[in-house]
Structures are given as C-alpha cells and as structure tokens.
Amino acid sequence: MLQLTNLFKASYKSILKNRMRSLLTSLGIIIGVSAVIVMVGVGSGSQKRIAQEINALGDNMLIVFPSFSMRGGVNRGAGSFNRLTMKDAEAIREGAVLLKYVSAVVMSGGQVIGNGNNWSTSIQGVDPEYQHIRMWELVSGAFFSERDVRSRKKVAVLGQTVVENLFGNTDPVGQKIRIRNTPFKVIGVLKEKGQDARGQDQDDIILAPSTTVLVRLKGDRFINMINASAVTLDKIEKAQEEVSEILRREHKIEYGEEDDFMVANQTAITEMASETSRIMTKLLAAVAAVSLIVGGIGIMNIMLVSVTERTREIGIRMSVGARGSDILTQFLLEAVVLSLSGGIIGILLSMGIAFILNTWSDIRTVIEPMVVLLSFTFSGAVGVFFGFYPARKAARLNPIDALRHE
Amino acid sequence: MKPVIEIHEIKKTYHVGEIDVHALRGIQLTVEEGEFIAIMGASGSGKSTLMNLIGCLDEPTSGQYLLDGIDVSALSKNEYADIRNQKIGFVFQGFNLLPRTSALENVELPLFYDRTRRIENPQRAAGEALNQVGLADRMDHIPSQLSGGQQQRVAIARALVNQPSILLADEPTGNLDSRTSVEVMSVFQALNQLGMTILIVTHEDDISRYGRRIIRMRDGYIIGDVPVKNRLNADSVLASMKEEEPCCS
C-alpha cells in the first residue's frame, strides 16, 4: 500500500475539484446525520421534560386508587368500585412509618361565584399535608389546618387561574366565594404552577378541606384517592408495600384474594410516560437512519458516475504505474471523505437546528454525545460500504481500455 | 552496447466477438541502449499494439519480452504496474494529462506511485524535468492554459521524471501542427543525445527521419528495419522555419 497520506491528498484534491458535485453528494449524508441527531434529540428532550414534570408533581409521591375487586372470579362491579374512605386515609396516616405526608383527595367541580364573577373549575378536597405532597407554595394567606378539616370548615385556597377570573388583580384573601351555592371564605392563594405534561392548567383549581368537600359539597362516603409522600426516594417501593398491607388489613382482604385498590408511585408513572416517547424516539431514529442509507446510495451513484467519467484519469494513473489497489484506495477514500465530511457538516447542522429549536420554539432538544458519535461512525461506514463497489470497478479497469475511453 | 529490449516471437491476438484479430503475428526485435527508433506503418499494421506491449500496458498472447534483462511476460499485474512506473516513460498522442491539475503536479504523478522512493524530492525532480523540456516558467499552468506543443512537452517531462530505461511515444506529433511537431522532435533528439533510448510510433515520413533507425510494419509483421539516411536535425529545421516565416515567430 502506498503512503495513505498521498492517496488521501489525491482524494481530497479531486473532491475540491468538483466542489458542487461533492456538496450535493454529501447532502444526503448531511441530511441523514442531522435528521438522526435532531430526531433523537427531540425525542430524548421530550422524555426528559415529561420526567421532570412528573417529578414536579409531587415529593416522592404515592397514589392510592380504588379498583375493581374480584371475589371468587366474580366481578363485584360498580358497587365495589369506590372503596376508599376517610378511614382508610386515617389508617395509613396512623400505621405507615415510611410515609411523611398523607392526604385524602376528594374530587369535585362546579360553578364558583365571587366578586360578581363566575367561573367553572375543579374543586379538590384535601388534607393540610397535601400542600407538601404536591409542593404547592402560597403567594398570599395560609393553607387550612387540621382543625379546619376536623370541623369541616368552609374555607378555600384558590389557584391563580381562579383568582384571575374571579378577582382580577386584587388579593382575594378574606373574601367570600360561593361554590355551588355554599359560601366559602378564601384564606389563601396558590403560587402559579403552569401547565402539566398533558397541557392541563394546574392553576385552575380550588383546594378545600377534604371533609368539607366530601360531606358538604358531595354528600358522599367515598374519597377518590389518597396521596402520600414516602420519607425518601429509595424507600418509595417499600412504602408502597406498607400501604398495601395496611389497606388489605383495613379492607379485610384475605390471603390469596386480589386487592380492591391500586398503589402507584411517581417513578412508575414517569417510566410509563417516558416509555411512550422512547418508542417514538426509536421510530424517529429509524426513519432518519433510512435517510442516511438513502444518502449512501446517493454516494454510490455519484461514485459510479465518477468512475465512468474519470476512466481516462484512471488510465493515466495506471499508465504511470498506479496499481489496482492504489486506484481502489483512492476511490474508497474519496467516498469515505465525502461521507465523513457530510457527517461532520450534519453534526454541526443538527447543533444549529437544536439551538434554534431550543431558543425559538417549545420543542426541547437534547443532543446526545453517543448519538453524535454513532451517526458519525455510521456515516463513515456508509462511505466504505457504498464506495466499495464503484472503487473496485475502477480498480479492475485495464489500463489500455481506460486510456482509450472517451 | 547492452540490449534494453529483446523481443522473441511475440504474438498478440484480440478476440472481437467470434473473430480473432491477429494484431501481431510473431515479432523479433532487439533495441540497444541509446537508440532512437521510429516504428512506421499504416493503421492496423500493429505498430500501436507493439508499442503498448513494449510499454507494459498490455500483455502478449505468446512470446518472450525481456526489458533490461527481466522477463516481463511472466509478471503479475502489480509487477506490471511497477515496471511501468520504474522503467518506462510513455508519451501519448492525446497528451493524457490530468485536467485541472498543474503541469508540476502532472509531472509529479509517476513519483506519487513510486514505491521505491528512490527520488528524494519529487517536487524538485518534477521541476527539473519541466526545465529539461523548456517549460520551467509554466509549472503552475493547468493543461487548458497550455498550447498543444506545451502540453506534449509536459507529457514528455512526466515520462522522464522517473528516469526510465526507455521513452516510448505513440504518435507524439499526431495532434500537433508541423512547427510544434518539430519542436517536440527537438526535445526527443536532445534527450537521445544525452543517452536516452527512444521509440516512437509515427506514420509521417518527416517525423521518422529525426530518428536513427526505422522499423516498418505491415499486417502484424516487421517488414523493414533500416538505419535512417539523411537524418534531420530538429534545431536546424526550426532555424530554417524561422527564416521562411519571420512574421510568425
């Protein structure tokens, strides 16, 4: 083999001599590489955002839902559905050592009137610890207390959206509002949280004592769910088991019978949500990888044309002593240099696109170094793979025939 | 005198479809160091085929060919390439320079493929070769910026740069007007004067008279092999041309 630097120089020169064509050839690779990087970047960006938003939901949060129960293979149906009560929440609060906060959650909704305006919103009955579980901060007033819950006091804490729609810019603390014709006193205002991962406005909410909502607004026995915080993140699964045990005892579920409730934890929800976007990312990457291969075929096409067009040049090189292997290496190097420089430009382009997306749009893009490395390597491999056939074709030419080629 | 080329009973047959074309039907030839031979013949006489075989661009169907005492007919493709690189300088009718490549780089090309690296400074060697053909001031020009005669002189410089044993030229003046033809022949004569063995193929009687020996071919055979009588001197022909056309120099 000749000095590789010499052959590299020859390839480099011939690429520069056909600037426009080289650029167009590389374009396939440029688009392919930048598509892979940006697509995967968008995918993992949204994955990270979802994870972050779910983590922002609460502090090591556990959620207990009621679920259908089966006894002896018979689904007991709707009557068995809403099986969580205040007693259950109380039992968990009393019994669980791995939980730091516990709150019953009673969901309701309806028309709210205040300050001469009205607004339809969701009303959640919760316990004071709910504030810490969901990491709500107050901008004004105070959260209700344990005593307010026990005495079913008609007090409410308003979310920003509700405040804006009823009171505009004035501070509503101390004002009266009517929720479904029941008068409540506003004692606090929540700090703005914005939209959640599904695009729902988290500030369109009124929080009131769980007992008040359950008894005075809904007139019901069953609560919708129980939220709790584990003491630490790594205890979250142990806490889950603990809650299960307490509830099975409480519901008198015998060994071997199924739970009539479900305990989910925040990390599990996070994983579920990011699984979807992970599949999406893979799909996008696959589509982008196809475009890389198409780019490779473009290189092969141009190299084949180039071999035909430069048959005379090959003949000249052979007549002054180039071996077949020298010609092979030169054309192969040309293909690889084309695809690798396409790869580099593609990487730079994808960085530019990621920057533009992050700066001027809602789409968050995270460029993964691993993906950059992979697509760069892949573009080189594309060059070798698709450059080999035309290069071998060139190397096999007979010098006389090559020289006679017009 | 030591023989540079010894050819015994060389035959070359091409297969065109189902027809066999016998381009060479048994050639016997010995060329000694320092000779200047013109091979003549009508088209189809086999002169170019013979030239390509001598230049190791093509392989004979049968027969033996010794170049500098080495039996070339037994060599592999790669060894053929190396022989072309080390021992042969080839000049073509159509110049065959790399387009969009400077004269200097064109001349450097054979050194680029020289695996022995016997020439230490390829760029200087290429410069010297260009100087030898009188193009020292055109080194950076690309072929399209040069006249036909200048291009052919670049091609001669390229053929010289590897210090070959023989210089082969296939119709070197075929694409040139009469005046530049003589200029090119003057370069060949000067090189021969310095001891270079030269073979040219031509169908022009005038051109053949710049050599020392004429070989005539017909139908794949050598039919005549005579020394040149009334040898022309390119430099004096050029001088007389200037006298005839003072307006156009």
Image (cartoon, coloured by chain):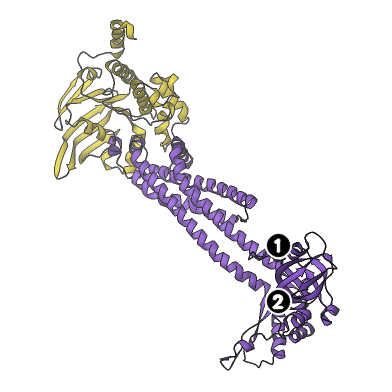
In percent of width and height, residue A344 lies at 54, 47
Q: Which quadrant of the rendered structure holds the C terminus of chain A?
A: top left
Shade representing chain B: yellow
Q: Which chain is purple?
A: A
Residue B100 x, y percent position in the rendering? 41, 30
What residue is at 58 percent from the left and 94 percent from the top?
A72
**Local SS, label 1:** loop
The disc, 2 or 1, on the residue closer to the chain's N-terminal end is 2
Q: Which residue is mark 1?
A: A194
Percent from the top left, x then y, of residue A116?
77, 66
Q: Which labelled disc corresponds to residue A108?
A: 2
Neighbourhood count class around disc 1 (C-alpha, 10 Å): few under 14, some 14–19, many 20 upward: some
* Residue A264 visible in image: yes
Most foreground residue, A298 or A265: A265
Q: Looking at the image, which residue is at 70% across and 74% down?
A: A109
B75, above or below B182, in the image: below
Question: Chain under label 1?
Answer: A
User: In this rendering, does residue A134 appear at all?
Assistant: no
State yes or no: discs 2 and 1 in contact (Cβ < 8 Å): no
Closer to the eye: label 2 or 1: 2
Q: What type is the residue that disc 2 sits on?
A: Ser
Q: Name the image quarter holding residue B195.
A: top left
Residue B128 is left or right of residue A259, and the answer is: left
Callout 2 and callout 1 share a chain: yes
Which of A260 and B43 lies nearest the eye of the viewer?
Answer: A260
Give amino acid for label 1. Gly
